[in-house]
Image (cartoon, rainbow, N blue to C red):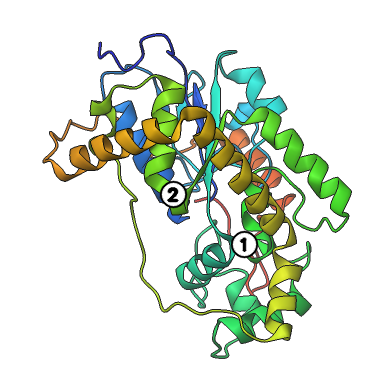
Amino acid sequence: MSGMYRVCLGFCVLLSLVTICMWNFSTFTTTVATKQKINKDVGRKGTNLKFTTQMYPKGLVGGYPGRFKCEFRFPKDASINLQHVRFDAKEMKKCFHTETRYFTIIRQPWNNFLSTYNFFPDYKKRNLVCSGMPTVYIKHGGKMGPTIFLSKAASLLNSSVPYYFRFRNYQSFDLGIDPMLQDISEIESHIKELDKTMDLVMLLEYFDESLILLKDLLCFDWDVLDEVGHYNQRYYKQVTSQTEDEKKNFEQLYNIDIALYDYFNKTFWKRVEVYGQDRMAKDLEILRKIQKEPSIVTADTRPGYLKVVDAQLKAEIQDYMFKNNGKCIYPGWKRPIYIP
């Protein structure tokens, strides 16, 4: 076995968009793809730990968008979750190792909005994860840029709209916080509680520094990081909010995400200070040198998609999703889409 584990052998569960990861670990869209890339590459480096496998609906696990439930984890003895789940620390501690390390990666809220806006389609798509919602609902067949989209979203989105949270504090939602919260003291309380649970909150804007802190947390050797990079980057036209109305709409929709990022941006740099600025600078040189070198690609032995064949279990997952804003009904469609 590789020396990557040394003292810190753990287990891993990843969450989402934010993804949550656990070593036993859990992480947090580009951040979901980036998170999955981290765990995929790390998991291939000399470990025999089991990954949760993708199941129908593809890409989701644990009853998402409902909070993670142990009974919906596949396989049952998985230590590393590569899929999109909604964080629930209390529930996860029931079915993952007591020494699990929790970490996630978040990004600047405005950039996260633009990424989400450009990622989700504005047309109806027949799948359970409801890729077009709530974009289809907001645009309603019209063409509009991000600023007009924000204005309509601010007036239309509420908890009765399927997948409304994709444009309402999306990162906070995936980390288990009610995206409709307005009370500042309550929001701060939830963020501080999250801080107590997470062993590390990484920042996408400072990805290399985040990887080094992750390496330190999990006692990895350098070779574990030779294939890890900012994965699945998407390029789109940058738009900055300029008018007071635009700023007001954005802050209304992302009030918790803004507070979340501000809080963990501060704790991140405090952690860098503890790690040591000189030490960080030297390690950044090592990491970037490694990233430029050709890497040896290890065979990916993870399982593929796992279909849920038990009819009763399938019905239970579906019902749980539907009760938690996961009912995929587009405007003009009378019936929801069901798990195939």
Residue extending farthest front:
278
**Is residue 299 visible in the rendered structure shown here?**
yes
Q: Nearer the viewer, residue 328 or 2?
A: 2
Sequence-first disc among 2 and 1: 1
Circle on res. 35: none
Residue 125 is left or right of residue 227, and the answer is right
Circle 1 crowding by C-alpha within 10 Å: few under 14, some 14–19, many from 20: many
Judging depth in this view, the residue of 305 and 191 nearest the camera is 191
Kindly state the secondary structure of the residue where label 2 is placed: helix
Q: Can you identify the residue that label 2 sits on?
A: 206
Image coords of residue 215 (percent x, y): 39, 28
From where the camera sits, is residue 332 visible?
no
Query: What residue do we see at 62% from left, 52% from top?
Result: 171
In the rendered view, would you say 9 is above or below 282?
above
Dot 1 amino acid type: Arg
322 vs 7, left or right, is right
Q: Residue at x 50, y 60 (%)?
A: 127
As rendered, which of 237 and 165 lies closer to the eye? 237
Q: Is residue 162 above or below residue 196?
A: below
Q: Is residue 96 left or right of residue 332?
A: left
* Quarter of the image where the N terminus is located: top left
Who's the residue at 49% across and 21% down the image?
A: 24
Kindly indicate the quadrant of the structure image that contains residue 299.
Answer: top left
Mark carried by residue 166? 1
Residue 47 sits above or below residue 182 on the image: above
**Percent position of residue 329, x then y:** 65, 67
Instruction: Please state the horizontal and vertical placement of residue 54, each as a whole percent of the image.
Output: 43, 39
Give the image quarter of residue 330: bottom right
Q: Nearer the viewer, mark 2 or mark 1?
A: 2
Instruction: Say what amino acid the circle numbered 2 marks.
Output: Tyr
